[in-house]
């Protein structure tokens, strides 16, 4: 009973006095903004890289093969190194000015990271469609891009969407790493509260709960879209 | 209508076609048979450049397909193809499968294409399946629809790549029946198949492809009753 009471007191201290809940809220706002823009940057980079990777297979254009080589290096390096190291390098390389916008820094760092994963998800989704679909389209006289647009991509999206949803959920969690470069996201704000109350566990548990609510919400959203996409062609 | 001159195709170091010279006339029904791995499917797939030949020439109605300046998409609109695995578009209805290409390529309006699809579905005996999805249909039905899809483009020639090989035995007949009707209507056809009965009955000329060359060609009667090539004799003794 005593124990429960003292735990309750700790969480009270981590949430209520000095309107500390506002700290979490501002951190949450930062995390959400960074995630949103990182997703947009990640999708943009991912689509461009995937187009390069997929179309270079069917073409001998020299520019495309150079771009393809670049894309391969990009994907290998980003996927093969820890995000926290990437953040340190990108932050100190590009954002050296003291008054850069933290949302921009966070979104760019996370977006560059996410783009590599998104491109591989899209590429795998496109390549999972049997080659016969492309051949059937081409044999009717459709061009490569017509076949891609009307036959391959609509099927690929159904494979891509669930994996992409997972990637976004990972991304939202991964943005917490951005706190190492003094961006006041949810993780960082939980740390601040802990340093005020001299009791670090409760604020981090609160932060964990908030992350969990976000990822559960995203999962539910993705499930909704998947069900919607699946309609009409159940076999 | 289709002329191949010294047609060759290699995959890496593996030479699959070692020089095929053929002259396919309008209205002919050329049946291609041969052991697996002989290059017969590769030969067929070269005719509409689904496989890029590595040597020789293909001339379709005076146009050299192997010339890089030729717009192969335009040519393919006049060459229908039917695949072993049907390759229908699973997320589209039967009607959409049939009308997609003619409408997208501006050969017809959507209304014209729909009317045409209805005619074709009647012809293949599936008038009530227009709004079904391919996944709901049997293999034989899917293959008949794949034939209708190719016919919707009003092709000058139809290429069949083992159209009955992926079917359950009881469905082979319905697909061959459609092909026979097509042959009777005067369609130029090139058919790769293992159906010897079909070859004998419908073929105007039969090619035996073995190890990348046409080892023997003849009229069905001579081909089956009087084979000269030793490998063909062996092959026929195994399959007949």
Image: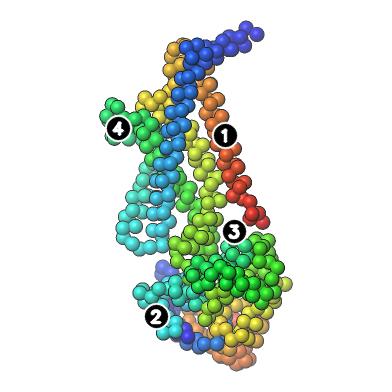
Q: Residue A86 is drawn in which quadrant?
A: top left
The numbered mark 4 sits on a residue in which chain? A
Q: Which mark is residue B91?
A: 3
Foreground residue among B183 and B240: B183
- Residue on which disc 1 sits: A217
Number of on-image labels: 4
At numbered mark 2, what does the secondary structure look like: helix, strand or loop?
strand
Foreground residue among B195 and A155: A155
Check contact, mark 1 vs mark 3: CB within 8 A.
Answer: no
Asked whether residue A8 is in view, the answer is yes
Cα distance, mark 1 to mark 3? 29 Å
> Which of the image's four quarters has the N terminus of chain A?
top right
In this rendering, the answer to whether B46 lies above or below B29 is above
Spot occupied by residue B58 in the image (x, y as percentages of width and height): 42, 80
Residue at image point 57% right, 33% down: A216
Residues behind callouts 4 and 3 on a single chain: no
Cα distance, mark 1 to mark 4? 32 Å
- Residue on which disc 4 sits: A95
Check contact, mark 2 vs mark 4: CB within 8 A.
Answer: no
Spot occupied by residue A178 in the image (x, y as percentages of width and height): 40, 29
User: Which circle's residue, 2 or 3, is located before the other in the chain?
Assistant: 2
Q: How many residues crowd around disc 1 within 10 Å: few (fewer than 14), some, or many (20 or more)? A: few
């Amino acid at each position: 009973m005593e124990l429960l009471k003292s735990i309750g007191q700790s969480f009270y201290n981590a949430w209520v006095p000095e309107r500390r809940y506002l700290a979490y809220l501002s951190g949450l706002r930062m995390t959400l903004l960074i995630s949103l823009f990182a997703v947009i940057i990640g999708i943009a980079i991912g689509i461009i890289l995937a187009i390069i990777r997929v179309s270079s297979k069917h073409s001998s254009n020299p520019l495309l093969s150079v771009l393809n080589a670049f894309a391969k290096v990009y994907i290998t390096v980003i996927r093969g190194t820890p995000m926290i190291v990437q953040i340190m390098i990108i932050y100190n390389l590009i954002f050296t000015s003291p008054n850069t916008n933290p949302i921009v820094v966070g979104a760019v760092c996370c977006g560059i990271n996410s783009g590599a994963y998104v491109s591989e998800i899209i590429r795998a989704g496109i390549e999972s469609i049997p080659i016969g679909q492309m051949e059937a389209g081409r044999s009717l006289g459709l061009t490569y891009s017509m076949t891609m647009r009307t036959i391959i991509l609509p099927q690929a999206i159904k494979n891509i969407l669930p994996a992409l949803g997972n990637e976004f959920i990972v991304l939202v969690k991964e943005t917490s790493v951005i706190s190492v470069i003094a961006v006041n996201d949810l993780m960082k704000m939980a740390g601040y509260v802990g340093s005020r109350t001299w009791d670090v566990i409760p604020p981090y548990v609160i932060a964990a709960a908030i992350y969990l609510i976000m990822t559960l919400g995203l999962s539910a959203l993705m499930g909704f879209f998947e069900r919607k996409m699946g309609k009409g062609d159940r076999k | 209508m289709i002329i191949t001159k010294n047609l060759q195709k290699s995959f890496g170091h593996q030479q699959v076609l070692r020089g095929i010279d053929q002259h396919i006339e309008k209205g002919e029904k050329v049946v291609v048979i041969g052991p697996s791995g002989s290059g017969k499917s590769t030969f067929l797939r070269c005719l509409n450049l689904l496989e890029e030949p590595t040597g020789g020439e293909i001339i379709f109605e005076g146009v050299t397909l192997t010339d890089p300046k030729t717009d192969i998409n335009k040519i393919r609109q006049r060459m229908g193809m039917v695949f072993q695995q049907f390759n229908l578009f699973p997320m589209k209805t039967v009607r959409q499968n049939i009308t997609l290409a003619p409408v997208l390529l501006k050969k017809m309006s959507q209304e014209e294409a729909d009317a045409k699809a209805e005619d074709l579905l009647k012809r293949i005996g599936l008038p009530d399946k227009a709004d079904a999805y391919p996944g709901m249909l049997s293999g034989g039905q899917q293959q008949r629809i794949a034939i209708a899809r190719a016919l919707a483009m009003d092709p000058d020639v139809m290429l069949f790549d083992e159209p009955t090989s992926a079917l359950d035995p009881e469905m082979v007949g319905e697909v061959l029946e459609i092909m026979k009707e097509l042959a009777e209507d005067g369609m130029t056809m090139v058919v790769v198949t293992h159906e010897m009965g079909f070859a004998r009955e419908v073929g105007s000329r039969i090619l035996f492809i073995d190890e990348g060359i046409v080892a023997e060609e003849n009229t069905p009667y001579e081909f089956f009753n009087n084979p000269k090539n030793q490998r063909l004799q062996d092959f026929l003794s195994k399959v007949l």
